[in-house]
Structure formats: structure tokens, C-alpha cells
Amino acid sequence: MISQLCSSFGLSERERLVLEALSDHGVQPASRIARFCGLPRNTARTILDRLVTLGLLVRNVRAHTHFYELERRDALLRVLEYRRSAFLKEIDGQIAVIKKMGDALGSHASAGTKPRVTFYEGWQGLERVYEDTLTATDGICSWASFDENQRAMPKYFGAYYRRRAKRGIPMRSIHPDTPLARAHQKQDHKELRTSRLVPADQFAFRPEIQVYDDKVNIVSWKDRIGVIIQSRDIADALRSIFELSFQGAHHYAPKTRERKKARP
């Protein structure tokens, strides 16, 4: 049981030895605990005082000597419940302050002349990149491969498309023409998307690029990295390039349908 207690509190091996000594021998001064554990007296006293601070031990003074004993179960539970309550209260206060600040936290970064660039790594980092797009206020423009997205994070994207549509964030997008892309294109109306397909043998791009508000994000599934660039100048430039490519992608639509009809 002592080992489980030590594990739950993240205690060291020496701290475990001290607790086990008190559990086996009852109330003891630091000198005896040091002898039981084979530790220098000052080291034992330091450990004992730390365990008192954590609330696991009780320290009493008898004839100018400090004696230590394990805290009672009920008293320890009360201490932990108080700490939990105080911690949650502190977090609630911090959340309230941040909510009152609104966009003030990011206003200085966006107001400067230099773009703000944030890098993300790993699957959780890439999810954060896409979660940021759900703050878009004027829609999203995207170059993306449905196949690569599906291979990378199938569960995430299944819900992401629905959540984006539920928030009323429209998307215009360009994708390599594949069977999966055609299946998703049939869901355009439901998922608040206008998509155009281009020949996969000519435009086989795998990373995704999205433009929204004053931001551009780039995600590489192969390298598992993502970057968000916050710059109105860069976002506007990429948005213009998207408009050019979106108009150009329209010319491939009839050819795509003709290839589909020609299949046996």
C-alpha cells in the first residue's frame, strides 16, 4: 500500500523508504528514521519535512525533539479535498480573467509589422492547426488531398467536416481527382463546401494549405509538422493565388465528367 501511495504522489525511492520505516515502526524521531533507512540524519530530516509539507506526515515536538508519524487517513483526505477545491477555484478564476480579456491577448501580436509564425509537431499539434481554422470568420480556401487527410487522421476529419459546417464556416477547395475525392464532393452541400477536382496525375499534392481571415496554415502529413502564419499581407496574397487556381480548376471539370462517362 505504501508503494501505491508513493507512486500516486510521485515520491522518490528515499521518500518511499522513509514512509515504510514510519509505517513499520510508528512514531519516530529523525535520528532513528535515518538509521532505519541508512541515510544521513540531515538528509532524513529534509525528506521528513518535505513529507510533512505534502501532508503525508505529522510532526510533533517532545522535549525539544521532533517526532514524525503518518497522517491519519481521514485527515489526509480532508487536506487533499481542500487542495483540489482551491486548485479548481484558482483555475476558474484564471479562465474568467482570460474570457474578460477577449482578443486582447493576441492583439499586440497581430498589430505588429512582422508576421506571427507558430510551428506544431505530431498528431496532436496538427489537430491544433485545424482547430484554429474553426475560428474563421470569412470562410476558408484550401488546397488539399482527401486521400492524404483520410490516411493521416480518419477519425478526426470525420468529425471536423461536420463541426465546421455546423459553425457555418464555408469552404472552397481544390483536390486531386480520386474516387475518395468524388465521394466527398457529393457531400459538398451537406458539409458547406464548394470543391473542384483536378487531374491527380498532374496535380498530386499531398500537404494541405488553408487560407482564412489573416492566416495561412501549411500541414505536411509526411513530416507530421504544421505551421500557422498570421499575416494579413501573406494571407491576402495566397487568397489571390487561390482565386486564380480555383478559376483554373473549373476548366478541368468537363474533362473529369467525360472521363467518367467513357469508363465501361
Image (cartoon, helix red, strand yellow):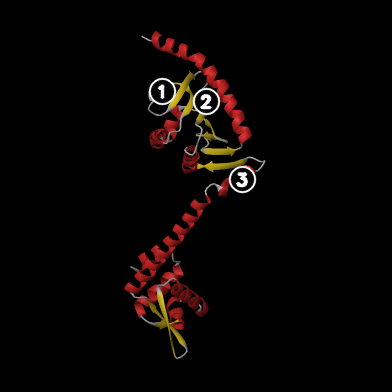
- Give x and y (percent) for residue 203: 52, 21
Q: Amino acid at mark 2?
A: Phe
Q: Is residue 239 above or below residue 5?
A: above
Pointers 1 and 3 in contact (C-beta within 8 Å): no
Q: Which residue is mark 1?
A: 185
| Vertical relation: 83 (above or below) 91 | below
Is residue 42 found left or right of 74 in the rendered image?
Answer: right
Closer-to-camera residue (36/12): 12
Q: Secondary structure at mark 3?
A: helix
Tell me the mark number nearer the camera, choosing from 2 and 1: 1
Q: Secondary structure at mark 1?
A: helix
| Residue annotated with mark 2 | 205
Q: CA distance from mark 2 to mark 1?
A: 18 Å
Disc 3 marks which amino acid?
Answer: Ala
User: Looking at the picture, which amino acid does disc 1 mark?
Assistant: Gln
Work out how far the residue at label 1 is from the one at label 3, CA to CA, in angstroms: 37 Å
Counting from the top left corner in percent of width and height, residue 53 is at: 46, 73
In the image, is residue 238 above or below residue 30? above
Query: In the rendered image, is residue 181 in sight?
Result: yes
Identify which residue is drawn at 43% across, 12% down. 257
Q: Residues within 10 Å of mark 2 (few under 14, many from 20)?
A: some
The residue lying furthest to the right in this view is 113
Residues at badges 3 and 2 in contact (C-beta under 8 Å)? Answer: no
Residue beneath the point at 38% across and 79% down: 69
| Residue at the disc numbered 3 | 109
Let me know if residue 202 appears in the view. no
Q: Residues within 10 Å of mark 3 (few under 14, many from 20)?
A: some
User: Residue 143: percent from the left, percent from the top?
Assistant: 51, 27
Q: Is residue 120 above or below residue 40?
A: above
- Dividing the image into 4 quarters, which one contains the C terminus? top left
